[in-house]
Amino acid sequence: MIGRIVGTLVEKTPPELLVDVNGIGYEISASMTTIYDLPQVGGMVTLYTHFLVKEDAQTLYGFIDKNERALFRVLIKVNGIGPKMALAVLSSMSAEELVSNVQESDVSALTKIPGVGKKTAERLIIELRDKLGQAAKTDLFSTPAVLRQVQTDPRQEAEAALISLGYKPQEAARAIAGVPMDAASSEDVIRAALKGMLRN
């Protein structure tokens, strides 16, 4: 129904965005991969979207390119993987890393994603292997991540984003505490925190 949004970025509070299109503000949920690649608030953005309608909610998801949207659509078709977990997957590792982990049946790597237990990781591997089998050989799901500055308290925003992605408040706070103080933006902090948690 809504396939693309082009407008002015009004708010950026990961993982939520507000984009103004000719006076209408669209609330959009996005992965950190997409948010890393957005301009500062006030800049123009183009997002490819997936509109999801449920009995109790209508949610618009936005992606930096069609490839990330395609991967999101593949993920939400996996039994037990909803949109929130799909965003967590896309936020926790690159598309290339996901494809590699699936091809190598790396359950351990996938269980480091918030909300993904061993059974879910095994199901992801089984159901995604055929669909993503050729992705590593192409640029089908390549999503370049370019960090941008945001005019907010980066550590507070990063902690809130991690909680929204499914981490417990204590886990989020601990991860943020482990990020060097010289991280300049919330995207820097979130990326460093996610990498730190995935290494542990």
Image: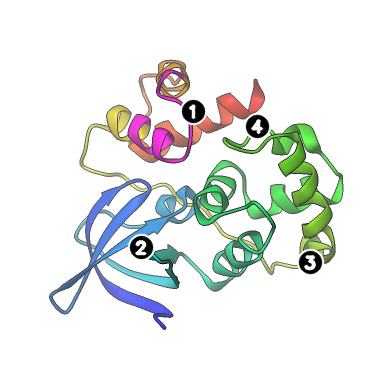
| 123 vs 181, nearest the viewer | 123
The image shows residue 117, relative to residue 26, as above or below, that is: above
| Disc 3 residue type (three-letter) | Lys
Q: Earlier in the sequence, mark 3 or mark 1?
A: 3
Q: With 184 as the anchor, is 30 left or right in this view?
A: right
Q: With 71 as the anchor, is 16 left or right in this view?
A: left
The image shows residue 46, relative to residue 30, as above or below, that is: below
Residue, disc 1: 193
Residue, disc 2: 57
Residue, x 23% and y 32% (percent of image)?
A: 153
Residue, x 36% and y 29% (percent of image)?
A: 159
| Disc 1 residue type (three-letter) | Ala
Structural distance between the alpha carbons of marks 1 and 4: 13 Å
| Disc 2 residue type (three-letter) | Ala
Residue, disc 4: 112
Structural distance between the alpha carbons of marks 3 and 1: 30 Å
Assess disc 1: are there few (<14), some (14-19) or many (≥20) residues with their C-alpha within 10 Å of its C-alpha.
Answer: many
**In which quarter of the view is residue 37 placed?**
bottom left
Structural distance between the alpha carbons of marks 3 and 2: 29 Å
For the rendered model, the colour scheme is rainbow
Q: Nearer the viewer, mark 2 or mark 4?
A: 2
**In which quarter of the view is residue 8 placed?**
bottom left
Secondary structure of residue under mark 1? helix
